[in-house]
Image: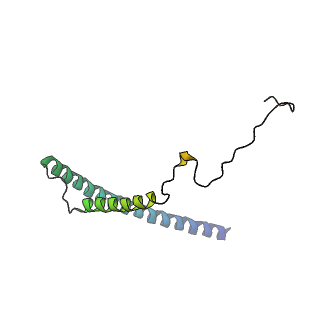
């Protein structure tokens, strides 16, 4: 019985220690998130001020560079995909697949109502 109590006390102490570590991690996460939100808010304010004054974005800003790089990558993929099948048109019925057509079911003498 005393062993069970000792084991239980150890378990409670370990749980309390783990809870303290978790709470510390939550607090540090909240601080980092708060700082990131503040930086984002400041950047948004600067961007809005630039828009209002007519400056807009600069050509060599990191945001503009990312967008131009992404558009180049997307164009590369689109050109490769369009040349894969050539002049294939699914409405013409071509393409080398056999056209499967099930036989007609005549529901005459066998009954079944249909």
Q: Which of 35 and 113 is in front in this view?
A: 113
Determine the residue located farthest toward the right in the rendered image.
109
Q: Which image quadrant: the C terminus?
A: top right
Q: Quadrant of residue 75?
A: bottom left
Residue 13, percent across and down?
A: 53, 67
Q: Which of 3 and 110 is in front in this view?
A: 110
From the viewer's perspective, tell me whether residue 32 is left or right of residue 3: left
Q: Residue at x 75, y 38 (%)?
A: 104
Q: Which of 15 and 52 is in front in this view?
A: 52
Determine the residue located farthest toward the top in the rendered image.
113
Q: Which image quadrant: the N terminus?
A: bottom right
Residue 70, percent across and down?
A: 34, 60
From the viewer's perspective, tell me whether residue 77 is left or right of residue 2: left
Q: Residue at x 38, y 62 (%)?
A: 76
Vertical position of residue 72 compared to residue 50: above or below: below
Q: Quadrant of residue 3?
A: bottom right
Determine the residue located farthest toward the left in the rendered image.
53
């Amino acid at each position: 019985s005393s062993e069970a109590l000792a084991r239980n006390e150890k378990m409670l102490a370990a749980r309390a220690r783990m809870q303290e570590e978790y709470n510390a991690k939550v607090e540090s996460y909240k601080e980092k998130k708060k700082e990131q939100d503040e930086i984002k808010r400041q950047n948004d304010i600067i961007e809005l001020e630039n828009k209002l004054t007519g400056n807009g974005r600069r050509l060599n800003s990191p945001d503009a560079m990312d967008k131009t790089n992404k558009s180049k990558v997307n164009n590369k993929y689109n050109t490769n995909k369009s040349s894969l099948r050539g002049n294939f048109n699914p409405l013409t019925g071509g393409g080398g697949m056999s056209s499967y057509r099930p036989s007609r079911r005549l529901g005459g003498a066998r009954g079944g109502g249909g």
